[in-house]
């Protein structure tokens, strides 16, 4: 299974870490180690992001943007 991971949210406007950032990523990734993991680690062009979502079987995200895009494209996923 190919899983798309959005591991962190951008910092807040005041420069602090976003409270959306999930503190247990290493444990989660360890549980998913038998799957192909693709990490979203920066801001991607729209077309590239859509291709990444279409190519995955499942997604895990820290905010609802990827959730809405994934569901719009018919992909299953979860927001932590």
Image (cartoon, rainbow, N blue to C red):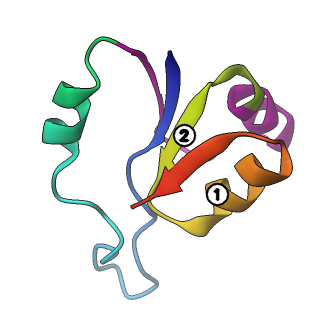
Question: How many numbered markers are drawn?
Answer: 2
| Image x and y of residue 12, in percent | 42, 80
| N-term-proximal mark, 1 vs 2 | 2
Residue toward you, 32 or 11: 32
Q: Is residue 76 rendered to the left or right of residue 42?
A: right
CB within 8 Å, label 1 to label 2: yes
Disc 2 target residue: 59
Q: Position of residue 61 (x, y in %)?
A: 48, 52
Rendered location of residue 30, percent (x, y): 17, 27
For residue 14, what is the image quadrant?
A: bottom left
Q: Image check: 76 left or right of 49? A: left
User: Which portion, as a residue range, is magenta?
Assistant: 35-53
51 with respect to 61 (left or right): right
Residue 67: which numbered mark, if any?
A: 1
- Residue 20 forms part of the magenta stretch: no
Q: Secondary structure at mark 1?
A: helix
């Amino acid at each position: 299974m190919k899983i798309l991971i959005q591991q962190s949210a951008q910092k807040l406007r005041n420069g602090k870490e976003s409270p959306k950032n999930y503190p247990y990523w290493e444990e989660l990734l360890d549980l998913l180690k038998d799957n192909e993991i693709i990490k979203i680690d920066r801001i991607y062009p729209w077309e590239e992001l859509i291709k990444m979502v279409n190519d995955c079987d499942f997604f895990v995200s820290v905010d609802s943007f990827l959730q809405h895009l994934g569901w719009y494209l018919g992909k299953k996923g979860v927001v932590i």
